[in-house]
Amino acid sequence: MNQPLRKVPDAVWRDAEEIEVLTFDIAGETFALEAVIVREILDLVPETPVPGAKDFVGSVINFRGRIIPLADIRIAFGMEAVKATIDSRIIVIEMEFDGEINLIGIRTDKVNEVTTLARTASELPPSVGMKWRADFISCLVKRGTDFIIVPDLEVIFSTQAEK
């Protein structure tokens, strides 16, 4: 018996058929963030560890004179930490938490490109067989023979804050 496809939440697409995203790699997987939340892409900068902070956001960086947290979403996904390479970058994003706009740096292994993803190529992550928590993923988007992971940063950040 064919099961109907589970519909990707409209929060990802906001009634649009396409979204513009920035793609990047972490641990050999390709992720995408909506381009409108990206403020800047930085080469690696000095980090200051925060004593007692959780590994997920264990340090801060100086971004244009502001101190902002540096998140490593690979920790939320249970991936192993790796040493930075010449391709490593920090993506500075702007997100709203509790009614307040926040700047956050996200560590990546490599930034790829700004591209457009089609709603028709998106699916919810399977509820069985995933190596990561399905609620951390807004959707998967098929592109050629690969999948691009669109993480649900709100869920990831709120879950990691509770730990």
Image: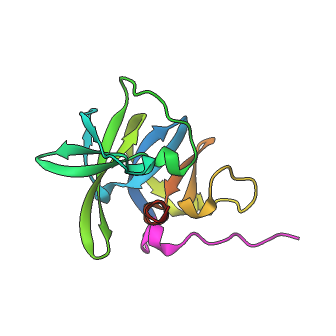
Farthest residue toward the left? 65
- Look at the image and tell me in which quarter the N terminus lies: bottom right
Q: How is the image coloured?
A: rainbow
Q: Residue at x 58, y 55 (%)?
A: 140
**In the picture shown, does residue 18 fall above or below 58?**
below
Side of 118 relative to 65 (left or right): right
Farthest residue toward the top? 86
Side of 100 relative to 124 (left or right): left
Residue interval drawn in magenta: 1-17
Q: Residue at x 10, y 47 (%)?
A: 65
Q: Main secondary structure of the magenta part?
A: loop
**Residue 5 among those drawn in magenta:** yes
- In this view, the residue in front, 159 or 12, is 159
Please state the horizontal and vertical placement of residue 88, each as a whole percent of the image. 37, 31
Farthest residue toward the right? 1
Please state the horizontal and vertical placement of residue 141, each as a whole percent of the image. 56, 54
Specify the quadrant of the image occupied by residue 28. top right
Please state the horizontal and vertical placement of residue 95, each as a whole percent of the image. 31, 63
Q: Residue at x 83, y 69 (%)?
A: 2
Please state the horizontal and vertical placement of residue 136, each as a whole percent of the image. 55, 60
**In the picture shown, does residue 130 fall above or below 155?**
above
**Residue 94 among those drawn in magenta:** no
Side of 145 relative to 76 (left or right): right
- In this view, the residue in front, 52 or 74, is 52
